[in-house]
Image (cartoon, rainbow, N blue to C red):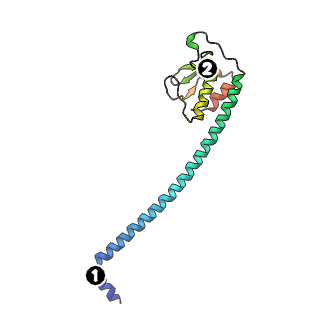
Amino acid sequence: MSSIISRFYNRNSVIVFSVVAVSAYFAYRYYQRRRRTDTFADEDALHREIRRRRVEKLVELRDKLEQLLGSLDNFQPELPDTEDDECIVCNSAKAIIQTYPCKHRVLCRRCFVRTLQVAVNDLNLPLKCVVCRARIQTLDRDRHEGNPTLALLGANILF
């Protein structure tokens, strides 16, 4: 019996080698695809978790903005000294929010919070300057250290 196999092997070694090589290739591809599918499942679970955390943070941020806007309704805005000091949105309050790195000071507190609220609701983050569209990295915190509502805004919102 072994002589039959040995004769067959000697005569058809190329065919046997080809069958073994093709089988090994398909086994390799199968395990590679299976490993990739497992990796995709892990990545998909990770992306779902990240998305869930982002939604939670956005809901928390929306609630904080609602509270901040409510507290600003009781706040009397400063009147502008000159036309250049006016808020470019409402034209009735002094523009005191300065953005960095562009250093534009064109929005009052209330209009800035509303702009931020719209950006969060529309998912247009990171926030950009209304004048030059540069990404806002921080706000002028020195101007509103005495006001706890704006200190809350400057301390808890990272752009």
Q: Quadrant of residue 67?
A: top right
Q: Which residue is mark 2?
A: 108
Q: Is residue 6 above or below residue 83?
A: below
Q: Position of residue 13 (x, y in %)?
A: 29, 78
The amino acid sitting under disc 2 is: Cys
**Which of 22/140 is in front?**
22
In the picture, residue 6 is in which quadrant?
bottom left
Q: In the figure, is residue 107 to the left or right of 7?
A: right
Q: Few, some or many C-alpha atoms within 10 Å of disc 2 (few <14, some 14-19, many ≥20)?
A: many
Residue at image x 54%, y 29%?
137
Q: Check the image and name the residue furthest to the bottom.
A: 1
Instruction: Pick whichever of labels 1 and 2 is earlier in the sequence.
Output: 1
Measured from the top left, where is residue 22 in percent x and y?
36, 70
Mark 1, Cα crowd under 10 Å, few <14 / some 14-19 / many 20+, is few
Residue positioned 61% across, 15% down in the render: 94
Residue positioned 67% across, 29% down in the render? 152
Q: Residue 135: horizontal and vertical position, in percent?
A: 51, 29
Element type at marker 1?
A: helix
Q: For the residues marked 1 and 2, what is the alpha-carbon distance in whole angstroms?
A: 90 Å
Q: Quadrant of the C terminus?
A: top right
- In percent of width and height, residue 28 lies at 41, 65
Residue at the top extreme, as displayed: 82
Residue 135 versus residue 25 in the image, above or below = above
Residue at the disc numbered 1:
10
